[in-house]
Image (spheres, helix red, strand yellow):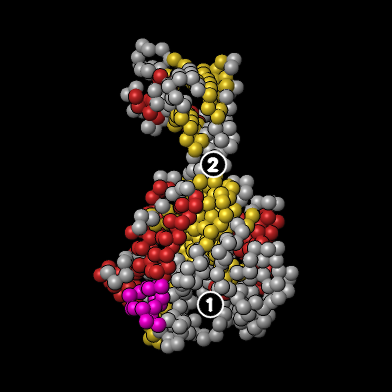
Amino acid sequence: RIKKATNRFPAGSADAIALANENQRRLLVLNDGSSGQNPNPTPYIGSGNTVRAGDTVVGNLVGILDQGPINTSSPATLDYRLHPTETPAFTRTNPRTPAPAAVGGNVKVASFNVLNYFNGNGSGGGFPTSRGASSAAEFERQRTKIIGALSALDADVVGLMEIENDGHGAQSAIQDLVNGLNAAMGAGTYAVVPDPANGTGSDEIKVALIYKPAKVSRVGASLSDPAAINNRPPLAQTFAALNGEKFSVVVNHFKSKSCSDAAGADLDQGDGQGCYNARRIDQARQLLAFIGQVRTAAGDDDVVVIGDLNAYGKEDPVAQLTQAGFIDQLAAREANPYSYVFDGETGYLDHALTSASLNSQLAGVGHWHINADEPSFIDYNLEFKQPACAACEPDLYSATPYRSSDHDPVIVGLQLVRKLNGTAGRDTLAGTPGDDLISGGDGADTLTGGAGADTFVYRSLREAGDTITDFVPGTDRLHLGALLASLGYTGTQPLADGYLKLVSTPAGTSVQIDADGSAGSAVARPLVLLKGVAASSLDAARDIIVAP
């Protein structure tokens, strides 16, 4: 596939220039012989009433090659066009996926550009609005797709871009979206983060946040940055996981690449970054200052920066953030990341960056490709489709997440764990309602994990004699890696090798350690009692970590 040069290499670099040149030389437009929008029959359509970017041609393309306009821009771009004399066939090599790939972790944060979600007057009327759906019927189609996509994302915190800037009251667009999600997923599943005291700016659209109160809680009030450089003020909220671990989410929507009204330094500099790059650089610098305020208010350094930065992965605004110490997690963890396709080139405008302090707590990250690869003619709009346009294609809309927007959503998995450590004496430690990492230390301790997926850590035989009161097989785990390593054990099957024994007792399962395994003369000694747990309910591969 053709990859945006500045998604892979810094703008103006020799590599970026070479790739941009190669992209131009590789581009060939398949001409359908029509200048109409959404002609009937729909050319090249495939299974599922779609043809996705990344699908491949079966066999050869045969036709007449010429050069001419390939888009409706003014002036139009001129390039090579192929007029097929044999009907092309495509293979679905880039299939749809019914849900995003798992990113792991115990808290999920997502970012989604909802493409001008405007709900009229909030009571079923008030259409057309200045943006988005032009009728109540179109809005219902748009709403169904957006709710389907967000339901499948199932994130605990979601940053939204391009939602109507009309507050957060009962008739607002953001509350309408949450109402729809709660109707689909269960009452109270999501709640709105209230607009901040500094406001959401004067643009028709804003950024917003919604969250699951059952998974995270808000810490303090939401914050925004009303600095004049921001077209749409960034929005920040600090959250706490069920175990009390805090993190802040900052959602953004930088100035677009459109050249309308651009002047001076904001004009297209011919380096592949489009118009208003200078302003986006200034917005990135201002964002760093705002993040400093967010950290101070939170009393915590862990920050997730999400949103549509309108800058590809290696462009200057993103570099401002990474040079300040933020980690571009998509570049670090996803091969060829993209969330947007423009003129056939793939790249990501939708980002997930984290503070360095959060890097070790990041479980996974990725895009869900439900929009960028899909053709626009399957979206919610009714114009240029039958019956509104008799000469146009049939209405190929479906009540699915596909082409719910023009940007792909991003999802981030965080593994936020509360650490509890005992002393060298006899301790009684109780965990939180969330996920905990509990180490009793030396001496016979009584440990209670509480709700959540808890891990109990043992590093030495001096820590023997503990009782875990509420170990749940399949949820909680014992971490014996450091202890086994201290005995010189380097294998991966300590149960089979005789270093580990699970012994049933009237009180529960006694987890025992044999210091020299089945080959030696030492006897197994109790390490910890899993109170009330039957040995038959334990699966060593699932419930016990043996890697150091």
The majority secondary structure of the magenta stretch comes to loop
| Earlier residue among tags 1 and 2 | 1
Residue 417 as seen in the image, left or right of residue 377: left
Image position, residue 338 (x, y; %):
43, 63
Q: Is residue 271 magenta?
A: yes
- Residue bearing the label numbered 1: 43
Asked if residue 198 is positioned above or below residue 361 in the image, the reply reads: below
Identity of the residue drawn at 40% across and 26% down:
459
Please state the extent of the stretch shown in magenta in the rendering.
263-279
Is 234 inside the magenta-drawn segment?
no
Residue 206 in the figure: left or right of residue 311:
right
Residue 381 picture location, percent across and down: 62, 75
Quickly name the residue at label 2.
Answer: 244
- Observer-nearest residue: 251 or 35? 251
Image coordinates of residue 274 in percent, x first then y, are: 39, 76
Position of 35 compared to 164: left or right?
left
Quarter of the figure with the C terminus = top left
Give the class, few, some or many, for how many residues have Cα within 10 Å of label 2's Cα (few <14, many ≥20).
some
Of discs 1 and 2, which sits in the foreground? 2
Position above or below: 131 against 479: below
